[in-house]
Image: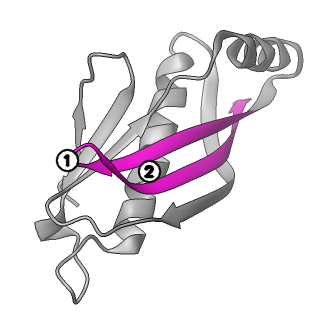
Amino acid sequence: MGLRVATDERGQFVAEAPVALNHNHLRTGFGGSINALATLAAYGCLWLELRGDKALHVVVSESTIRFLRPVRETIRAICAHPNKKELRQFQSAFAANGKARLRLSVTVEEDGKLAAAFRGTFVASMA
């Protein structure tokens, strides 16, 4: 995939991959690659939130994606960190039960234009 993690000045988790390695027959971003990159961006964001916790298992339990426009050069998946209230609820449930769910949103952009919108529910559990 040629995946790389990029930094973002707003503190968001960003993953990128070139369309040249992830294209369809029209030479635009392959939907499966776009979905995979969005999933990985959300997974990476949650994994970083759990640093120091004993969550060894993080899985996606449900996801949806809407493709809005073709991506021609770079697939850029941006996961916003959860808001403080959602994060506190997640952390409380995780501490109490050893398992918790969190819904994350990812935007896929090219040249600042929205190309796809992803939402996924991720489950973290203790080993």
Position above or below: 114 against 85: below
Residue 113 on the magenta segment: yes
**Relative horizontal placement of residue 100, taking residue 16 as reference (left or right):** right
Amino acid type at mark 2: Ala
Nearest to the observer: residue 47 or residue 87:
87
Magenta segment range?
102-125
Position above or below: 86 against 28: above
Q: CA distance from mark 2 to mark 1?
A: 17 Å
Q: Residue at x 21, y 53 (%)?
A: 17
For disc 2, the marked residue is 38
**Relative horizontal placement of residue 32, taking residue 24 as reference (left or right):** right
Q: Position of residue 85 (x, y in %)?
A: 74, 12
Nearest to the observer: residue 91 or residue 110:
110
Which type of secondary structure does the marked residue at label 2 adopt?
helix
Q: Position of residue 77 (x, y in %)?
A: 36, 45
User: Splitting the image into 4 quarters, where does residue 36 fall?
Assistant: bottom left
**Relative horizontal placement of residue 61, taking residue 113 as reference (left or right):** right
**Which label is found at residue 111?**
1
